[in-house]
Image (cartoon, rainbow, N blue to C red):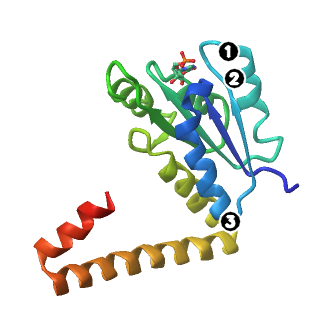
């Protein structure tokens, strides 16, 4: 198996349904990754060792997801020189706003690249883009991905223009 370039960590296994989407994205780009649970609150020593050793182990980007008082991404960023992408995981009590603010409001000097609430997919994509600076084959796949997005929207626009809003909406609603 190829050595992991991206480390995906999350505060709890309850974050896995969301964080798995980052892993799926990396798989689409053939980027080797590892995925595990690390909590700054519940396993501070494990968090410290993970962040301290990440670079030495060959990781190049870390994606960290957490909910609520989501200190994990910021704490990891304070220890490692690697770029850290934070995923605010939606909580039941405050809809993820607490997670978002905990991750995005970092003090100057310790950035965490924060994606939207629950948008682990974008975290995977951002990790791929960061790696694309160094790996031309990944950069090429990003270009193809963007081209795919462009085509998809163009096709939808054409269909909407041809069928009119009402008919388009009917088929859109049917798709669910
Ligand atoms: N925010 C953190 C940290 C941390 O930041 O260290 N560790 C766990 N958690 C979060 O607590 C939430 C509830 O966890 P449980 O579902 O295990 O009770 C999760 O979203 C997790 O990311």
Q: Mark 3 or mark 1: which comes first in sequence?
A: 1
The location of residue 35, given as percent across then percent down, is 71, 39
Q: Which mark is residue 107?
A: none
- Circle 3 or circle 1, nearest the eye: 1
Q: Nearer the viewer, residue 152 or 56?
A: 152
Element type at marker 1?
A: helix
Q: Which mark is residue 47?
A: 2
**Residue at 70% from the left image edge and 49% from the top image edge:** 60
Residue sitting at x 75%, y 46%: 59
Under circle 3, the secondary element is loop
Residue for badge 1: 44
Q: CA distance from mark 2 to mark 1?
A: 5 Å
Vertical placement of 50 versus 172: above or below? above
Q: State if disc 1 and disc 2 touch (CB < 8 Å).
A: yes
State whether label 2 is within 8 Å of ligand 1: yes
- Density class for disc 2 (Cα within 10 Å; few <14, some 14-19, many ≥20) is many
Q: Residue furthest top?
A: 42
Q: Quadrant of the C terminus?
A: bottom left
Residue 168 higher or lower than 121, as above or below:
below
Where does residue 175 sit, x and y in percent of width and height? 32, 63
Disc 3 + disc 1, Cβ < 8 Å: no
Closer to us: 168 or 65 = 168
In the rendered image, residue 65, in percent from the top left (x then y), is placed at 54, 34
Q: Nearer the viewer, residue 74 or 36?
A: 36
Identified at 55% across, 30% down, the residue is: 15
Q: Measuring 20% from the left and 73% from the top, which residue is drawn there? A: 168
- Disc 3 crowd rating (10 Å Cα; few below 14, some 14-19, many 20+) is few
Estimate the spatial distance between the alpha carbons at disc 3 and disc 1, rounded to whole Å.
32 Å
Q: CA distance from mark 2 to mark 3?
A: 27 Å
């Amino acid at each position: 198996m190829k050595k992991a370039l991206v480390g995906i960590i999350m505060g709890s296994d309850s974050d896995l349904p969301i964080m798995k989407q980052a892993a799926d994205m990396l798989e689409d780009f053939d980027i080797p990754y590892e995925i595990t649970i690390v909590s700054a609150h519940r396993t501070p020593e494990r968090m410290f060792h993970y962040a301290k050793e990440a670079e030495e182990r060959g990781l190049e980007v870390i994606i960290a997801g957490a909910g609520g008082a989501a200190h994990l991404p910021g704490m990891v960023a304070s220890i490692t020189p690697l770029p850290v992408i934070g995923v605010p995981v939606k909580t039941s009590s405050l809809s993820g706003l607490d997670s978002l603010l905990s991750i995005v409001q970092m003090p100057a000097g310790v950035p965490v690249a924060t994606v939207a609430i629950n948008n682990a997919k974008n975290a995977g994509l951002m990790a791929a883009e960061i790696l694309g600076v160094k790996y031309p084959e990944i950069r090429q796949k990003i270009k193809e991905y963007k081209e795919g997005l462009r085509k998809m929207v163009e096709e939808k626009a054409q269909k909407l223009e041809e069928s009119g809003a009402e008919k388009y909406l009917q088929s859109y609603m049917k798709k669910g």
